[in-house]
Image (tube, helix red, strand yellow):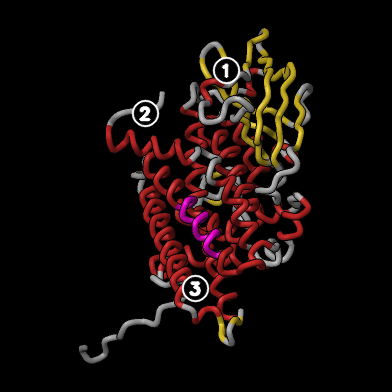
């Protein structure tokens, strides 16, 4: 070793590959700010929120104050961060709970993004500043009870009546629906699928919250009902026709998920690591047992690999090079990885792993939903299958 050379570093069990060194100072500051907020405002109470099936609406303004809502968009009160920084925020939010990350994803990527990308200047000025501040909450109405992976089969429709539009139909499994001030609703029209901005107080528009969930409980999930909802012509998003509109929004949300899932996995791994060093069996900590160390190492490797995948895709996105297939790669594999880590962590904690005193079972249940929403595992598999074979396995 040459004089003055630095030897190998001592691995950090919470950042084994020193991924932190791949981030710049601004990235780390944003990440640490969100991590501190989650530690102060989410982690102390989220187990109770999960048990009660409750999401505190007041968190929206706090998230707005932090610049988290629509943070990757430019202008109109949005922070204009990089894709990587948006992803890092999602990692920290989901390390707290999938409900917190889902709120930010739905607000920014599914509700604000379509107005920002496809709306008129008047629509942007009217809605985006309030949504960025957290004063207005949005939701995204695409999925229906009988139309999930095949949105082209949606039954919700909009028909012209003079200069107005009249919407009829319903949407299902809508995050933030019951607390929303505005809904972005996608409907069939004679010219193709169009997006509409539906204010909460519009006559004929109603929501019904979905209860008895055992996953994403610290999140509001609702049905949207549209019964002869009359909207003026300027409620339609003018700059997109067809499914490419809502699918572009979903791709934005999936990007946040591929980072967020790493946060959930990391929280489970760290809970198992800490527990294994404290839990005594046969007169010594279970961390000293070979089988436990194998589990811990497998989880650590998975979390570090997932973070590297997310960071690479994030940098591709910042360079304008990330395609739909790349986002599918990250969403599918990182959520699958996170579920595996959560289940392994649960086994390390034993019976304690099923209580809400520890975060593991909460993350594990949440990830069961994350695994299938914003495109099921099967859909993402077939997107990549078409990319590598050139053959579409679904219509």
Depth check: 60 or 302 in front? 302
Q: Quadrant of residue 182?
A: top right
Q: Residue furthest bottom?
A: 3
Q: Which mark is residue 188?
A: 1
Quadrant for the N terminus in the image: bottom left
Q: CA distance from mark 3 to mark 1?
A: 54 Å
Majority secondary structure of magenta residues: helix
Would you say residue 338 sits in the magenta stretch? yes
Residues 52 and 295: in front is 295
| Left or right side of 181 for 6 | left
Query: Residue 327, percent across and down?
Result: 42, 44
The label on residue 301 is: none
Mark 2 crowdedness (10 Å alpha carbons): few <14, some 14-19, many ≥20: few
Q: Is residue 1 above or below residue 306?
A: below
The image quarter containing residue 63 is: bottom right
Label 1 and label 2: CA atoms lie apart by: 25 Å
- Image point 64% across, 24% down: which residue? 235
Q: Which mark is residue 292?
A: 3
- The residue sitting at 59% across, 21% down in the picture is 187
Secondary structure at numbered mark 2: loop
Badge 1: few (under 14), some or many (20 or more) residues near its Cα, within 10 Å? many
- Under circle 3, the secondary element is helix
Select label 3 or label 2 by which is in front: 3
**Badge 3: few (under 14), some or many (20 or more) residues near its Cα, within 10 Å?**
some
Give, as a single range, the part of the protein colored magenta: 334-345
Q: Quadrant of the C terminus?
A: top left
* Relative height, residue 275 to residue 60 (above, below): below
Q: Who's the residue at 65% across and 57% down the image?
A: 362
List x then y, in percent, for residue 156.
63, 20
Specify whether residue 78 is in view. no
């Amino acid at each position: 070793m040459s004089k003055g050379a630095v030897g190998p570093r001592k691995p950090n069990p919470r950042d084994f590959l020193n991924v932190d060194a791949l981030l710049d100072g601004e990235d780390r500051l944003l990440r640490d700010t969100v991590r501190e907020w989650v530690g102060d405002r989410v982690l102390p109470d989220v187990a109770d929120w999960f048990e009660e099936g409750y999401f505190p609406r007041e968190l929206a303004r706090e998230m707005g104050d932090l610049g988290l809502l629509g943070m990757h968009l430019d202008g109109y009160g949005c922070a204009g961060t990089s894709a990587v920084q948006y992803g890092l925020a999602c990692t920290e939010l989901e390390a707290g709970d999938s409900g917190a990350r889902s709120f930010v994803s739905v607000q920014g990527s599914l509700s604000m993004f379509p107005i920002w990308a496809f709306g008129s200047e008047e629509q942007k000025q009217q809605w985006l500043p309030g949504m960025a501040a957290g004063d207005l909450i949005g939701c995204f109405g695409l999925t229906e009870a009988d139309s999930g992976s095949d949105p082209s089969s949606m039954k919700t429709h909009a028909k012209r009546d003079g200069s107005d539009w009249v919407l009829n139909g319903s949407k299902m499994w809508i995050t933030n629906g019951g607390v929303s001030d505005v809904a972005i609703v996608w409907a069939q029209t004679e010219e193709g699928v169009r997006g509409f901005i539906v204010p909460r107080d519009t006559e004929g528009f109603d929501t019904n919250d979905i209860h008895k969930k055992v996953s994403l409980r610290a999140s509001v999930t609702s049905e949207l009902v549209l019964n002869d909802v009359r909207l003026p012509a300027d409620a339609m998003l003018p700059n997109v026709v067809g499914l490419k509109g809502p699918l572009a929004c979903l791709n934005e949300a999936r990007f946040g998920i591929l980072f967020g899932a790493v946060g959930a996995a990391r929280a489970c791994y760290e809970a198992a690591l800490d527990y294994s060093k404290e839990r005594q069996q046969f007169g010594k900590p279970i961390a000293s047992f070979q089988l436990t160390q194998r589990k811990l190492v497998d989880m650590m490797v998975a979390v570090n690999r997932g973070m590297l995948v997310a960071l690479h895709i994030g940098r591709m996105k910042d360079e304008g090079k990330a395609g739909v297939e790349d986002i599918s790669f990250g969403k599918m594999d990182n959520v699958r990885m996170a579920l595996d880590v959560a289940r392994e962590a649960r086994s390390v904690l034993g019976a304690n792993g099923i209580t809400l005193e520890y975060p593991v079972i909460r993350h594990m249940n949440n990830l069961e939903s994350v695994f299938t929403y914003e495109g099921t595992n099967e859909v993402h598999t077939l997107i990549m299958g078409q990319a590598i074979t050139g053959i579409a396995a679904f219509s």
